[in-house]
């Protein structure tokens, strides 16, 4: 009976140690994942700010007055004279 009790005690001790190691491992993984989550949330916030800046920049470049100025200045485009306009009908 003493041998059986010693075997049961040894098995329970091993189970407790395995459980404790499992708890430690799980907490470690939880902390690692939390750090990764925090890093990704910071990255998401940074990307949101960058996206807002790019939207503002796009709106600035898409203004009709700016497009007209670029077309006239860099491309040498101009508004045609009324006599140079021809209507094409099908």
Image (cartoon, grey):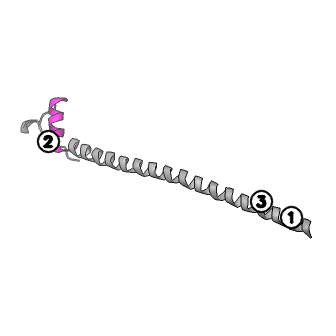
Name the residue nearer the viewer: 7 or 42.
7
Q: Is residue 81 above or below residue 10?
A: above
Q: Earlier in the sequence, mark 1 or mark 3?
A: 1
Query: Is 23 on the left-hand or right-hand side of 53?
Result: right
Question: Magenta segment: does it hold 28?
Answer: no
Res 14 label: 3
Asked if disc 1 and disc 3 are in contact, CB closer than 8 Å, the reply is no
Query: Residue 80, position in %: x, y?
Result: 11, 36
The residue that appears at 18% across and 34% down in the rendered structure is: 71
What's the CA distance linking mark 1 and mark 2? 90 Å
Secondary structure state at the residue bearing disc 2 = helix
The residue that appears at 34% across and 50% down in the rendered structure is: 48
Question: Viewer-nearest of labels 2 and 3?
Answer: 3
Check the picture and name the quadrant holding the N terminus.
bottom right
Query: Residue 79, position in %: x, y?
Result: 11, 37
Res 65 label: 2
- Tell me if mark 1 has few (under 14), some (14-19) or many (20+) residues whose alpha carbon lies within 10 angstroms of its own: few
For mark 1, what is the residue? 6
Asked if disc 2 and disc 3 are in contact, CB closer than 8 Å, the reply is no
Query: Is 61 on the left-hand or right-hand side of 86?
Result: right
What's the CA distance linking mark 1 and mark 3? 12 Å
Secondary structure state at the residue bearing disc 1 = helix
Query: Magenta part of the protein: which range?
Result: 62-76
Q: Earlier in the sequence, mark 1 or mark 2?
A: 1
Question: Viewer-nearest of labels 1 and 3?
Answer: 1
Name the residue nearer the viewer: 36 or 87.
36
User: Which residue in the rendered view is the most extreme toward the bottom?
Assistant: 1
Query: Is 38 on the left-hand or right-hand side of 80?
Result: right
What's the CA distance linking mark 2 and mark 3? 78 Å
């Amino acid at each position: 009976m003493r041998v059986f009790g010693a075997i049961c005690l040894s098995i329970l001790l091993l189970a407790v140690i395995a459980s404790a190691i499992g708890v430690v491992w799980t907490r470690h993984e939880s902390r690692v994942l939390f750090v990764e989550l925090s890093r990704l949330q910071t990255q998401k916030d940074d990307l949101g700010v960058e996206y807002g800046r790019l939207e503002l920049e796009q709106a600035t470049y898409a203004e009709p007055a700016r497009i007209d100025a670029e077309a006239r200045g860099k491309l040498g485009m101009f508004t045609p004279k009324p006599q140079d306009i021809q209507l094409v009908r099908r």
